[in-house]
Amino acid sequence: MTSAKVTDRSNQEWIAALSENGQRAQNDALADLRRRLQRSIYFYLSQDRSDLRGLAAHELAQMAEDLAQDATLRVIDNLDKFRGESRFTTWATKIAIRLAISDLRRSRYKDFSLDELTADGDLLPISTRLASSASPTPEKVAERDDVLEKIELALKEALTERQYQALVAVAIKGIPMDILAERMGSNRNALYKLIHDARRKLKTHLEAQGISTDYMMNLFGN
């Protein structure tokens, strides 16, 4: 990345310059802020994100530039929330990194399909089936497989389609709540309740078959 000289400012000077509403001081401060955030984001992408190691430097630089534009706008929108408890640039950088993390997470799950996510087949991963650190006996392996089949069947029998999709997406597939809420046309609070109700129905359904939570913990934890 190319380096450019940025002006050192106190917290008060940053706030005053960025609040100038179209004056030259504001334009200079915006440019300085964007360059600072771009450098910080580039460092985060190149040093702290092992999942991006395969990208070339110019690709990371372009990502940092795009994210810095959005982060600058986010900082401006939140100026009234700055309390001066740290350096302004530190506060702004935290906003930028949170934005980068959120954007990367959304990019990771942008193409997932709820229908494909909950398609027929094994819902529970192999890691769940082989949760024990010790080698289980053949009898215990058979018992676990039987319980897992009942859990998978219960997911489909006891829950509504929407409960089923939400619970599988979050609890089994690890889809972030905010992304799933957006994809389902809902919000976090409504999704929390949906999943809570789904867990309760699933627990009741399994207990009616003699499969309690304590039983499952003992079966898969030893």
Image: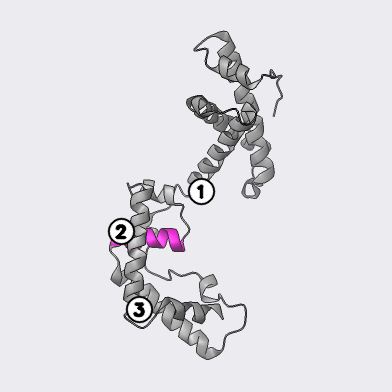
Please tell me which of labels 2 and 3 falls first in the chain: 2
Instruction: Identify the disc placed on residue 207.
Output: 3
Which image quadrant: the C terminus?
Answer: bottom right
CA separation, marks 3 and 1? Answer: 36 Å
Question: What colour scheme does the image use?
Answer: one colour
Name the spot of residue 66 as percent of width and height, x first: 55, 31
Name the spot of residue 221 as percent of width and height, x first: 54, 78
- Assign a secondary structure to mark 2: helix
Q: Return the residue nearer the eye: 206 or 162.
A: 206
Asked whether, in this view, residue 34 is left or right of residue 118, the answer is right
Which image quadrant: the N terminus?
Answer: top right
Task: Single out the mark in the foreground, 2 or 3.
Answer: 3
Question: Neighbour class for label 1 at 10 Å: few (<14), some, many (≥20)?
Answer: few
Question: Neighbour class for label 3 at 10 Å: few (<14), some, many (≥20)?
Answer: few
CA separation, marks 2 and 3? Answer: 22 Å
Q: Return the residue nearer the eye: 126 or 185.
A: 185
Q: Is residue 65 depicted above or below 169 in this figure?
A: above
Per the picture, the main secondary structure of the magenta-coloured stretch is helix
Please tell me which of labels 3 and 1 falls first in the chain: 1
Tell me the residue at 55%/33% (across/down).
67
Q: In this picture, which residue range is highlighted in magenta?
A: 161-173
Task: Single out the mark in the foreground, 2 or 1.
Answer: 2
Asked whether, in this view, residue 137 is left or right of residue 170, the answer is right
Asked whether, in this view, residue 186 is left or right of residue 104, the answer is left
Tell me the residue at 36%/49% (across/down).
189
For the residue marked with disc 1, what is the amino acid?
Arg
Is residue 200 at all visible to an observer of this figure?
yes
The residue indicated by pointer 1 is: 108
For the residue marked with disc 3, what is the amino acid?
Glu
The residue indicated by pointer 2 is: 162
Name the spot of residue 13 as percent of width and height, x first: 62, 16
